[in-house]
Amino acid sequence: MQLKNVMIPDCVRGFSSDATVFDVDLEHGLVAGIRPAQAADGPVVAGTLLPCLVDTHVHIDKTFVVTQTGAPDGDLFKAIDLMATHRATWTADTIHTRMQRALCEAYACGTRAMRTHLDWVEPGPPMALGVFERLRDAWRDRIALQCVSLTALDLFDVADPRGVIPPGFGEQIAQAVARVDQNCDRARGEAALLGAFVYRNERLAAKLQTIFDLAIRHDLQLDFHVDEGLDLDAQALGVIAELTIANHYQGKVTCGHACSLAMQPMAAAVQTLQRCARAGMHLVSLPSTNLYLQGAWDNTPVERGITRLKEAQAQGVSTSIATDNVADGFYPYGSYDLLETFGLGVQVAHLSPADTWLQAITTNPARAMGLGWDGRIAAGCPADLVLLRSRNRFELLTAAGRERRVIRAGQFLRI
């Protein structure tokens, strides 16, 4: 199959060329060749070619329940309570139905890999973990799936002055996550990670060190929800960076949200991002959920709730944009169309030119998730691609420009 007259943005190219429009040959499930398009009067652009998308922060265990939970209207901790109440009603069948729906939607939109956080509030594995494992296997070679245990940081408090945490709580979680990780197919990009929700905790460094100790002992990567609010004293991101360096865990830590970073003075924020760069950390921005949950609700919000993406990139921190919540007690809207979320992030964070940030939903998260293919389009790469109608960087953010045909293994996907 041949794709004629397509633009390939510079940031997803795995080849060098002065041309802007190309003809691409697909054979045997691979990109067989790429050459500048030829036309007597110059090629007419047919669309934009991207690698399939990578969504590195989602919550498919709790998705599509907003009609049952209601909406928190900007209150993060109300959202936590809404979902905690609803979680008591979960069954394996209802979780499976929600997860399956999310995967079908993401696949149709061109997503090839997802990392989902799973609520983990007891020492034993949550019901959603077994469902995840079954769906991970069922979706193998369509969507590479990773999971992260999501637990409140205070539950890793080994000192436990109030005596309310079950003995060995953190160790039991780490052991269960390690078992899942060992059964993952790394060559296909599967993994299980240890994680926590971190926000203005007392004895922050000690509790975080406990998680690093568990990760090191069980050879697990880490993925944190961190500083998901606008309080100036929410400064865990820098502490995680320092511990990453101190524990020689560079390249193994992802942090999502970091909303409060935007509230810090510029000099302090840059210092934190410099530490993140030295730590080799990956920073994930979740524009839809954070715009909804952060900032004022009794008047027009000025504070946007999105982390400092431009400054992070300037300091050499790898960044991505991801979906986060969809139609649940945290965010009542949304979809698993990552390009829609990308468009929102581009506008709210003033990311310009838009096409130069496409690595935030393709190559950057692919590398952060350790996928076998980093998403750069070149001869010999997998022919897992998204062909957009967009003919220039401005049409990327339009409904017409986001219209697409998804290509998997060199063939147009028929849904």
Image (cartoon, rainbow, N blue to C red):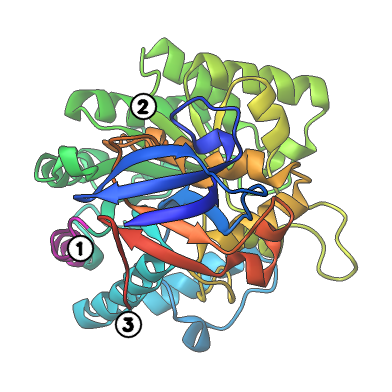
**Label 1 SS:** loop
Label placed on residue 252: 2
**Amino acid type, residue under disc 3 in the picture:** Thr
On the rendered image, what quadrant is the N terminus found in? Answer: bottom left
Spot occupied by residue 371 in the image (x, y as percentages of width and height): 30, 38
- Where, by quadrant of the figure, is residue 179 drawn? top left
Report the magenta residues as a range: 129-141
Which mark is drawn over residue 400? none
In the rendered structure, does residue 12 fall within the stretch colored magenta?
Answer: no
Count of marks overlaid on the render? 3
Picture quadrant where residue 264 is located: top right
Magenta residue check for 136: yes
The disc labelled 1 sits on which kind of residue? Trp
User: How would you rate the neighbour count of disc 1 (Cα within 10 Å): few for under 14, some for 14-19, many for 20 or more?
Assistant: some
Q: Using the image, determine if residue 195 lies above or below residue 296.
A: above
Q: CA distance from mark 2 to mark 1?
A: 25 Å
In the picture, measured across the screen, residue 18 lies left or right of residue 301, that is: left
| Residue 223 in view (yes/no) | no
Q: Residue at x 34, y 32 (%)?
A: 211
For mark 1, what is the residue? 139
Q: Which residue is mark 3?
A: 89
